[in-house]
Amino acid sequence: MAGEISVKPRSDDIAARTRFKGLARPAPWRGWAVVALGFLMEFMAAGSIFYSYGVFVPSFVSEFQASRTLINMAVTMVLVSSGLVSAPVGWLTNRFPLRYLALAGVVGTASGMVLCAQADSMAEVVWIYATVISTADVLIGVLIINIMIASWFERRRGLAIGLAAIGSSVSAIAFPPFAAHLVGAYGWRMALMIFAVLIMMLAPFVLWLGCAPEGGIPEWERKTNGAADLGNVASPPSWDEYLSNADFWIIALGIGTLIGLNGAVMSSLVAFGMGNGLDRMSATHLVSTAGATAIIGKLSFGIIADHINLKIALRMGLVVGALAMGLFALTPERDLLIIAAGIYGFSLGAQLPVWGTLTA
C-alpha cells in the first residue's frame, strides 16, 4: 500500500518499547500471565461499559424520565469518541510505558462508574461516557492489550490474542445477569459503585505484569532464532508520518468501524430483546448466548490465524456476521433471536482475534 512507513508493528518496533524499564531474562510463564491479565481487562471493560448497559436502561428511564434516544447516546458516544482517541493512544504507546497507560485506563473506567453513580441527569451520564469512559475504554481495551501481548508472543500470537479476547465473551455471559442481580438488590447507583471497586482491583496486576521483556520478544517465542537486533531499531514514527500514511487510515477506519458496530450491537441486544416482547432476564440471554458462541469463535480463529491467510479468516467472520444481522432483522421470535445471537457471537469471535493478529 501507499506510504513510507508501516503501521503494523514489526519485532523491532516492539523491541523499541523496551527502552522503558523492562524485564531482564523473563520466565516463560510471564507471557501467559500477561495473556491472563488481558483476559481480565477485556472482561471488566466490556462487561461494565457495554454488556451490562442494557440492564440499566429501565432504571435510567424511570429515574431521569429520559428518552431511549438520549439513553442510547451514551454508548454511541463511547464508540465515536473511542475511535477518535485510539489514534493518539496508539502514538503514545511508543512513548510511554504500557503499564502506566493501562493503569490510566483502569482508574479512568472506575472513576467514570463512580461519576455516573452520582449523576443527576441522563445528560450527565452521556457526557461522562463520551469523555471519561470513552478515553479509559481505549486505554484498558484491545489496543493496549494486543500490544502488551505482542511484546511477548510471535509464533503463537494469534492464539495468545484469541485467549485474551475470550474475556469479553465471558463478560457477555456473566455481566448481564450479574448486573441485573445488583440492580434488583441494591439499585443501579450502588451497582455502578460495585463495578468501580471490581475494576480497581486490576490496578496492582497491571503494574506488576505490564512490563515488556528486555531485548524484545523472548527467544522461545520468535519465529527465527537468535537475539533481536536492537542496534538497528528505528525510532517511532512521528505523528505527521502516521497521519500522512494510507495504511494507518485504512487500518484505523476499518478497526474503528468494526469494533464500533460490534459494540453497538452487543450493548443494544437487551433493549432489542425487550422491544420484541422478552422479559429482562430472557433478553439478557441474547447477550449471554452471543458471548458463549464467541468463545468458540475466538478459540477457533485464534488458532487458525497462526496458520492461514488472515484476510480470508476475517472475510469469513464478516460473512457470518452479516447472516446474523439478516436473522435479527427478519424475525421477532424468541428461539430464532437466540439462534441469531449465537451466530453473531461466533462471527465476533472470528473477527476480533484476526484483527488483533493483523495489526499486532
Image (cartoon, grey):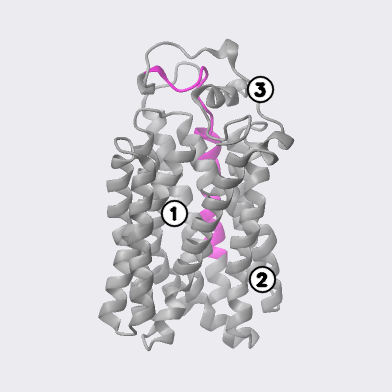
Residue 344 horizontal/vertical position (percent): 35, 64
Residue position for label 2 = 126
> How far apart, in angstroms, are the residues tagged by discs 1 and 2?
22 Å
| Distance (Cα) linking label 3 and label 1 | 33 Å
The numbered dot on residue 43 is 1
Q: Earlier in the sequence, mark 3 or mark 1?
A: 1
Count of numbered labels shown in the rendering: 3
Label 1 neighbourhood size at 10 Å, few (<14), some (14-19), many (20+)?
many
Return the x and y of residue 42 as percentages of the image width and height. Answer: 46, 51
Residue in front for this viewpoint, 216 or 4: 4
Where residue 177 appears, as percent x and y from the top left, is 38, 71
Q: Residues within 10 Å of mark 2 (few under 14, many from 20)?
A: many
Which quadrant of the view contains residue 336? bottom left
Q: Secondary structure at mark 1?
A: helix
User: What residue range appears in magenta?
Assistant: 193-219
Mark seen at residue 235: 3
